[in-house]
Image: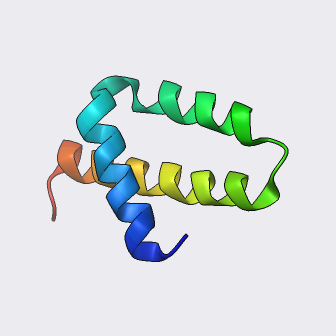
Amino acid sequence: MEEREVWIQAFAIIAAHGGLSSDYIIDQLSDALGSGVVVEDWRRVAAAVDMITAAEMYGSN
C-alpha cells in the first residue's frame, strides 16, 4: 500500500467509524493475521488514524 493510500484509508475509517475506528481496525487485523503484508498495511493505517485523531484532539500546532 502506498503512503497516499494509507492516509486515504485512515480518513475513510474515521469518517465511517468515528470513535469506533480502533474496533474496526482490530477486526480487520484479526481477519488478516495470515498475511504479513496485510498486517503491516493495517498497522500503518492504524498509526495514521492515531495521528489524525491526535491532531483533531490537540489542534494542528
Relative to 49, 28 lies left or right: right
Task: Count the numbered circles shown.
Answer: 0
Q: Position of residue 51 (x, y in %)?
A: 37, 55
Relative to 40, 34 lies left or right: right
Asked if 1 appears above or below 26 in the picture, the reply is below
Q: Residue furthest right?
A: 34
| Residue at 61%, 27% in the rendered image | 27
Q: Position of residue 33 (x, y in %)?
A: 80, 41
Task: Identify the image quadrant of the C terminus.
Answer: bottom left
Relative to 8, 24 lies left or right: right
| Residue at 54%, 36% in the rendered image | 25
Q: Position of residue 20 (x, y in %)?
A: 39, 23
The quadrant where residue 13 appears: top left
Task: Identify the image quadrant of the N terminus.
Answer: bottom right
| Residue at 50%, 76% in the rendered image | 2
Relative to 61, 14 lies left or right: right
Q: Position of residue 58 (x, y in %)?
A: 20, 48
Which residue is more in the foreground, 49 or 28?
28
The quadrant where residue 57 appears: top left
Q: How is the image coloured?
A: rainbow
Which residue is more in the foreground, 1 or 58?
1
| Residue at 41%, 32% in the rendered image | 21
